[in-house]
Image: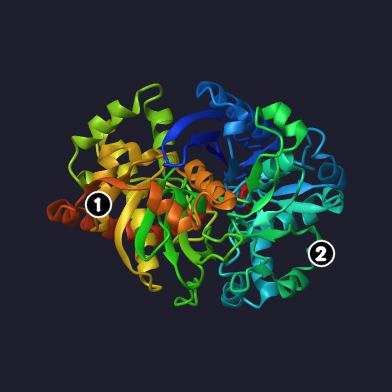
Amino acid sequence: MLLGVDIGTSAAKVTVIDQTGRTVSGASVSYEVDRPRDGWAEQPVRRWWGAAAEGIRSALGRGAIAPERVLGVGLSGQMHGSVFLDRRAIEGARDGEIDAIRPALLWNDQRTGTQCEEIERLAGGAPALVAVVGNRALTGFTLPKLLWLREHEPEAYARVRAMVQPKDFIRLQLTGKPGTDVGDASGVLLLDIERREWSGEMCRRVDIDPAILPTLQESAVVVGGVTEWAASRTGLRAGTPVVAGTGDNAAGAIGGGVGGAGLVLATLGTSGVMYAHSEHPRRDTANRATPGRTQTMCAADGSGAQAGHWCVTGCILSAAGSLRWARDVIAPGVAFETLEAEAAAVSPGCDGLVFLPYLSGERCPHPDPLARGGWVGLRAQHTRGHLIRAVMEGVTFGMAQMLDLVRSLPVGVERVRLGGGGNRSELWRRMQADVYGLPCAVLNSDEGPAFGVALLAGVGIGVWPTVAGACSSTIREVRTYEPDAVAGGRYREARAVYERLYADLTPAMHALSGSGATV
């Protein structure tokens, strides 16, 4: 058996698979996001470890899986979260539960607008930053959070001896060994993505000591074994190999079998991600006014035998999260299936109603922490079904904008694979095929990142020689949705309005945003 752990925004998910890729057992343990101020999003890191340990115990128990049958563990997690560790945490991880200096600032935290501006200034401008690290400075990324800590909590900053990502904190608790993979490291803004190593020049420009940056590995490399203490908390066998793993976007792509040309993974989770594999780093530099609308990162297909490739991703910050918000606000307690049925009864285009899904600011294609969401075009004739369908269409239009950016780099796209909880919706699947104008496929597994890093664990311990081989051996398409030309035409009209609204409403959005998101 192979076990994958994914530290998501709202839950720790554990998946156990056998060597054919069949899911044997699984568990999910939920937790909350803390929002101490408008635009802030934090989580205590012990919350993740408690949920991960409980999830592993539960998954092993549900499947009646003896610890010695688990041959390897892979780790995934929400990207960009800032875990600041002091010396005590680093040295004490082998023998007990540790804690971070402060709660982690998450990927959707928007407080670092000022720090992002400063990073781009120090780098010589946004195009210069993108040229080295593949990305512009966005509020969700990790380096701006470190600079925020330095400015606003200097006593805490003085204690920092290591900065890692969420899944790396679980790795530290499991193995006692700090470190990260090149994929998650790509989201820090200090990685030279061509060389797959930390950039000394960028560290110098922003005055960061490289000593606090973790050791780098490719994603399918074994980085240590489960300690005796961690074994006692999780039910795993002491010494079980643990691989470096990667961030949830790249892990989900592995779980979706997207490791070659022509395939794209569209994931509708809390956020929405468009992920494309690339044999070469493809930077988004065509538009000098707004470079780096998509992110270029190291892919998770590297192992101890060979370095991996690259990927291009775009992320909208509130995808299925927008639908969950709408349900909780306008239809609390109503089943999503009921709301989907109401939405399906409404024609494509929602009879002139459009939804902007900027509930947490936005990242792509508009890197704007002050963007704000809402319905536009409301009339008395609109029903709850219209409101819900407009949310789904608005999210899909945002995903389509990212797909167009990926194609423009250029990265070839022939078909789209669907992942994430939102893509369990039949309506949303069909809607994406019609809006993208491409076949959209559902896979035999929808376990996502946890499944992907379980495959990485298999590569790390030698079950498969390569990540591509692991994917081809276990993943297949089970249903395809072909685009409908008539529906596609209606969506194009609505999408044209949607795409004009951001520019039209930006002054109003910023005026209404207040100051909380940029503190």
Q: Is residue 333 above or below residue 415?
A: above
Residue 266, visible in the rendered structure: no
**Cα–Cα gap, marks 2 and 1:** 47 Å
Residue 325, visible in the rendered structure: yes
* Nearer the observer, 177 or 120: 177
Left or right? Give the position of 240 relative to 349. Answer: right
Q: Is residue 271 above or below residue 112?
A: above
User: Which mark is first along the chain, 1 or 2?
Assistant: 2
The amino acid type found where label 1 is placed reads Ala
* Nearer the observer, 326 or 182: 182
Q: Which residue is mark 1?
A: 433
- Name the mark on residue 380: none
Where disc 2 sits, the SS reads loop
- Residue 139: quarter of image: bottom right
Where disc 1 sits, the SS reads helix
Q: Is residue 159 above or below residue 16?
A: below
- Residue 198: quarter of image: bottom right
Q: Which residue is mark 2?
A: 209
Give percent across and percent down for residue 265: 39, 54
Give percent across and percent down for residue 404: 34, 65
Q: Is residue 219 above or below residue 431?
A: below
The amino acid type found where label 2 is placed reads Asp
Q: In percent of the image, x 34 and y 51: which residue is there? A: 417
Left or right? Give the position of 12 relative to 24. Answer: right
Give percent across and percent down for residue 37: 65, 40
